[in-house]
Amino acid sequence: MQAWDLTSYALPGVYLHIPFCEAKCHYCAFDSRPVVGEDVDAYCDALVRQIRRMAAHPWCRQRRFSTLYVGGGTPTVLGRERLCRVLEAALHCFAFAKPVEVSVEANPNTVTADLLAHLRQAGGNRLSIGVQSLDDRLLVRLGRRHTAAQGVAAVEAARRAGFANVSVDLIYGLPGQTARDWRQTLAAVLALDVEHLSLYELSVDPGSRFHQRPPALPPEDEVVAMNGITAELTAAAGMERYEISNYCRPGFACRHNLNYWRNGDYLGLGAGAVSCFGGLRLRAVGDPALFVRRLRAGEPVWTEGEALSLAARFRETVVMGLRCTAGLDLRWLRQRFGIDIHAFYGDALARLIEAGYLVADRERLCLAGHVVPVANRVLAELV
Ligand code: SF4
C-alpha cells in the first residue's frame, strides 16, 4: 500500500487556527489579520479553553486522533510560550494514536533557534515553512516581510532544532516572474533537501489586495514552462507528486492533509476554524475578540452549521479524492457510501473518461497525468 493511499487513514485530525500575521500579504484572502493591537494572550487562553471543552465532549472523548496541525495565519507569530502552550494543551487533552504527526506552519522571519527547539520539545515534529520565493524582488511584490536569505536560514534552523520532516511552500506564476526565475528558486529549495513541497500557482482571490489592484501576471506559455520545470526538477530530486500541488519524498506525504482529501472527519478549533464530523460541518465565529467573549461566557462558538446529505458527501469525496494522484479506490468508495460512481454521474463521468481527462479501470479512477495542471477545470464538472 502506498503511504498516501486514501483508504489507509481512518482517524480524524485536529486543527488549531491562529488567525494572526505580522502583516497582510498582497495575495492573501485567508482568515488572518495583523497581530498588532490584538489581544493575543486572551486568544490563546480562549483556545486552550476550547481545547479542554471539546476534548471532554462525548464525540471526542471516545475517539483517537491521528494528526495535529497548527495553521493560520502565522502560528509562530505567537512566540515561544504561547505557541508551546496551545500545542501542549492539545497533545495533552486529546488521545492521539502513535506515531502522531504534529505540523506547525511558520514564516521565515518569525522563527528563532530558541522557538524551534522549544517547539520540538513540546511535541512538534513537522514544520511547514512559508518561503514562497527565493527572489527578494518577488517577495517584495508579494508583500512578504522576509528575505530569501531568511527563507533558507529558517529551513537550516529547523534542521538544527531536530525537525526531520520539513515542508516548504512556494508560489509561482508571480507578477514579473519568468520561467528562468522559477527554475532558480525551485532548484535552490530542492538543494536544501526538504521532505515535502507545496507548490501553488498564484491566484488572485476576492478579499486580497491583488484583487483590488490586479498585478500583471506572466503569460500562459510562461506558466506552462514553469509547470514543465516543476515536473523536471522534482522528478530529478526523487520527489513524487502525490496531490495536485504537493510533492514529497517517499513516506513524507502530509497525513493531516491526506485526511482532508479523503474527506475524513476533522475537528477545527479557534476563530473561523471549520469542523466536519459525521456529515455535520460547523464553522466557528471568525472575529477573535468575539471568539474570546463566547468562550469566556461559556457560550457556543459556532456560527454556521450544515448537515450534509449523502449525495453531497459523496460528491465532495470524489472531487477531493481525485486531487490525489493515486486517485479514488472505487471499492472503498462503494463500501463507504453504497453508491456506484458511474450510476451517480452517468454521462458526465463517461464524457470525461472518453475525452481522456480521467482514467478508469474497475478499481480506480484517476486524473490523467496531462490534465493535472488544469485539474480544477475538470473537477468542476463533478462538483
Ligand atoms: S503569512 Fe500567510 S496567512 Fe498571513 S497574510 Fe501572508 S499569506 Fe496570509
Image (tube, grey):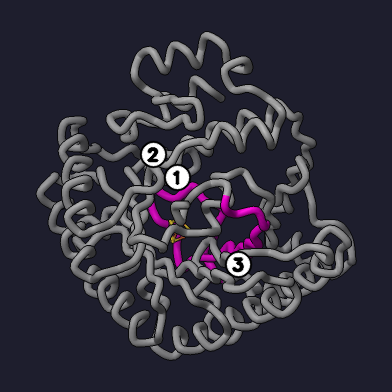
Label 3 residue near ligand 1, CB within 8 Å = no
Mark 3–mark 1 Cα distance, whole angstroms, equals 28 Å
Tag 1: amino acid: Ser
Amino acid of disc 2: Val
User: Residue drawn 59% across and 33% down?
Assistant: 331
Q: Secondary structure at mark 3?
A: strand
The label number, if any, that marks residue 174 in the structure image: none
Q: Quadrant of residue 334?
A: top right
Residue at the spot of label 3: 68
Q: Residue at x 38, y 42 (%)?
A: 244
Look at the magenta stretch and give its main secondary structure.
loop
Image location (x, y in percent) of residue 309: 76, 29
- In the image, taking residue 280 as reference, residue 37 lies left or right, namely left
61 or 83: nearer the viewer: 61
Label 2 SS: loop
Judging depth in this view, the residue of 288 and 87 nearest the camera is 87
Earlier-in-chain disc, 3 versus 1: 3
Q: Residue at x 42, y 30 (%)?
A: 376
Point out the stretch of residues depicted in magenta.
8-36
Q: Quadrant of residue 189?
A: bottom left
Which dot marks residue 204? 2
Front one among 7 and 160: 7
Mark 1 = which residue? 208
Tell me the element at label 1. Answer: loop
Mark 3 or mark 2: name the one nearer the start of the chain.
3
**In the rendering, at what x and y percent does residue 174 appear?**
25, 46
Front in this rendered view, residue 180 or 164: 164
